[in-house]
Amino acid sequence: MNIHEYQAKEILKSYGVRIQEGIVAETPEQAVAAAKKLTEETGTGWHVIKAQIHAGGRGKGGGVKLAKNLDQVKELADQILGMTLVTHQTGPEGKLVQKVLVAQDVYYPGDSEPKEYYLSILLDRAKGMNVIMASTEGGMDIEEVAEKSPEKIIKEWIDPAVGLQGFQARKIAFAFGLEGEAFKEMVKFVSNLYKAYLETDSSMFEINPVLKTSDNKILAVDAKVNLDDNALYRHKNLAAMRDLSEEDPLEVEAGEYHLNYVKLDGNVGCMVNGAGLAMATMDIIKLSGGEPANFLDVGGGANAQTVEAGFRIILKDPNVKAILINIFGGIVRCDRVANGVVEAYKNIGDINVPIIVRLQGTNAEEGARIIDESGLKVYSAVVLKEAAEKVKQVLAQA
Ligand code: GDP
Ligand code: MN
């Protein structure tokens, strides 16, 4: 689960990681009030207005602006709130900005040497360890740094049995060329950041940039946090940070039925039980000349209700020209799935895309019979290849 920058910063702060202070606002008036409050609390005269969307690259897209007085705070908040922000991470359709973070300006006016660094923590699955990635090339697009000068990214793997060691945090501070107070601050920053990452069960932390101010403070100017969905049950306060308006509505609906659904760009909707079978099905759709419109794993316990919910979700995607249902009846019996399909078809009504159903396993023949006798525009197939051929035929006719 992704969260907003302002929420990520709340987490960091609670772990003693210094941040660029800010207050979230939903209207220009709130932004002005926030700016006044920040001036009282931090003494800042200037403020940055930062669009809060679940995507990076906001600065380049015009979603991060500096305001030098309260009139500008109001003007810029008014401009950014409600804008459709397009960045390299949002896709061409962009994202609607509903909140801004009014933050203290930490690049002090006249500060000739603000230095930006890059820090991230994520799980290295191949090594089975968390890894801290650090670079002196902060503030830049890290993918670009990785491509053009990979030697500028250093990696520090953390043995889960012993945790982050002091020398590792110091190694990063050394690599940044820091000394004195800034060095100590950085060691503390890295240690606290790692603790926050671990204790929140996160799968990614990315702080870009980490800033060293001219008075040797180290602070997080940006914060991107991805929390592990599977651990949210033990972090009620973090689960509450979910912003459904930032997520794909179809994926949200699928989640309510415990369906694993990922929207894709193709034209063949598919409903499958089991993630491995779903991937094999997507492969065979491609082989037959189609493009999968989604990944949908209805899970092992699929019943008429889940099948119907899956149908509705797939059909809400206007690109879908055919649906392939591929179920292996193990725990779930094929006749039950077939009944579910027929029922869903009747309940939803007006389904004018062809549906190819391939049922295999327990009670497969009975399942096929139910579908054939239903009189609906549903094609049954027994082997996957046959199902793929049918998809090809119906796509050719579409
Ligand atoms: P991103 O573009 O989505 O990664 O958003 P960031 O939070 O990283 O901000 C983008 C850029 O805005 C940063 O790299 C900074 O150059 C600039 N920025 C952020 N905070 C401040 C600030 O307090 N003062 C000034 N002058 N610039 C800032
Ligand atoms: Mn950033």
Image (spheres, rainbow, N blue to C red):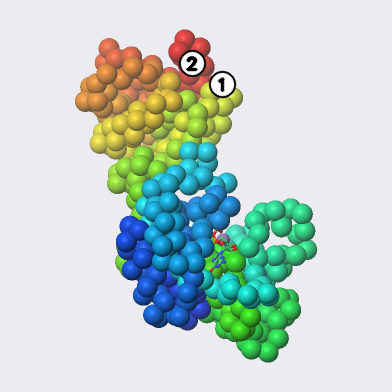
Task: Give the total number of marks visible in the rendering.
Answer: 2
* Image quarter (top left, top right, bottom left or bottom right) of the N terminus: bottom left
For numbered disc 2, what is the local secondary structure? helix
Residue located farthest toward the left when viewing the structure as drawn: 347
Q: Are marks 1 and 2 in contact (CB under 8 Å)?
A: yes
Disc 1 residue lies near ligand 1 with CB under 8 A: no
Q: Is residue 92 visible?
A: yes
- The crowding category of the residue bearing disc 1, from other C-alpha atoms within 10 Å (few below 14, some 14 to 19, many at least 20), is some
Pointer 2 local density, CA inside 10 Å: few below 14, some 14–19, many at least 20 = some
Query: Dot 1 lies on which element?
Result: loop
Question: Of all residues shown, which one is farthest toward the bottom?
Answer: 180
Write down the quadrant of residue 294 in the picture: top left
Residue 237 position, x and y percent, is 33, 68
Residue 395, labelled with which disc? 2
Question: In the shown orientation, is residue 185 left or right of residue 52?
Answer: right
Which percent across, then down, holds residue 122? 57, 64
Residue 288 numbered mark, or none: 1
State whether residue 129 is above or below residue 56. Answer: below
Q: Amino acid at mark 2?
A: Leu
Q: CA distance from mark 1 to mark 2?
A: 10 Å
Which three-letter amino acid code belongs to the residue tagged 1?
Answer: Ser
Q: Residue 92: percent from the left, percent from the top?
A: 52, 38
Q: Is residue 367 above or below residue 42?
A: above
Query: Residue 14, image x and y in percent?
Result: 42, 78
